[in-house]
Amino acid sequence: MRNSTLASRAGYVDTQATLIRASLLAAHSVHADGFRAVDLRFYFRLFSNWLEQDILRPSQDLELTQIRRSLQALQTAGHCGQPLPKRFVLTEAGLLDTAEKLVDEASVAFEEMLFVLLFAASYRDVVRARVLGAARQIASSTRHRLGSILDPKRISRLAIRNAARLVGDLEQRIAADRALEEQMTKLLREGLSTSEVVKKLTDGGAYQLQRIKPYTELLLQVPEDLRTAELRSGIATRRQMLFQPLLARAQEELRQLQDLRM
């Protein structure tokens, strides 16, 4: 779970935390005498533009007031210092924490995987040279750790593993739904009522919230017409219009990540 002080204070959803962290690293690396809130916002806008978020999420932006408050919170946490008025630098702990979360807490969304991989492949050496060259007090162990965190080969393996996990999950959901649909069809052909069919179901198919509310319990709670629709066509429609297209996309994304393997 993401718990970046900056991300939480800015009120952003999970997909924004990666860009915020990358913007922190970029601003810290470029501005040797400390970065300003406006510098951080610029890099956030730049990275957002790379990911076409000005089209996908046109209303989202970072406000300077939010950034300043968040940077103050980072200071309180010991992750940020202020060498000059209105200028900030990441501390050693803040630098490592930001880099680690940039990589390890990125979502499995394809565009986010690509962005983190690009950031590491393009800027790892620049970040290490600019940050550590300007802050000689940082220990050599931190220099090594930062290089390991932003290792493109490690990130590439992580991205491929996450993408393969998504493909596997979708394949399992589709197979489970087919099995459930066959069971439902068989029971309906026996002339059972929808409530009787539900009570005889042995699996929830692609339904993955069994621990919260069992699938059979959910079906027995909905009105008869909705239950009938679910038993007769809901599963097949969901598979054809959602899970199968998602699987096709996930498989293609996995292939592209494998082609980019470092």
Image (spheres, helix red, strand yellow):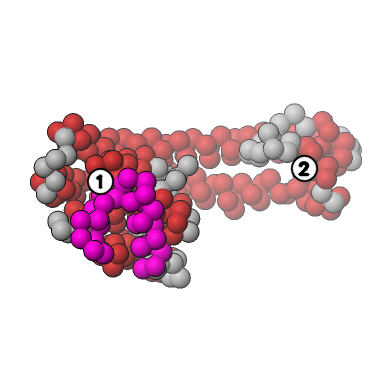
Q: Is residue 171 left or right of residue 186?
A: left
Residue that sits furthest to the top in the current view: 202
| In the foreground, 117 or 35 | 35
Magenta residues span 64-91
Q: Is residue 72 above or below residue 185?
A: below
| In the foreground, 5 or 17 | 5
| Element under disc 2 | helix
Whole-percent x and y of residue 238? 64, 49
Under mark 1, the amino acid is Thr
Can residue 129 be spotted in the picture? no
x 69%, y 35%: residue: 210
Whole-percent x and y of residue 95? 26, 45
Q: Which residue is mark 2?
A: 218
Looking at marks 1 and 2 on the same chain, the residue that comes earlier in the sequence is marked by 1
Give the spatial CA distance, label 1 vs label 2.
51 Å
Q: Which residue is mark 1?
A: 91
Q: Quadrant of residue 191?
A: top right
Q: Is residue 249 left or right of residue 145?
A: right
Picture quarter with the C terminus:
top left
Under mark 2, the amino acid is Leu
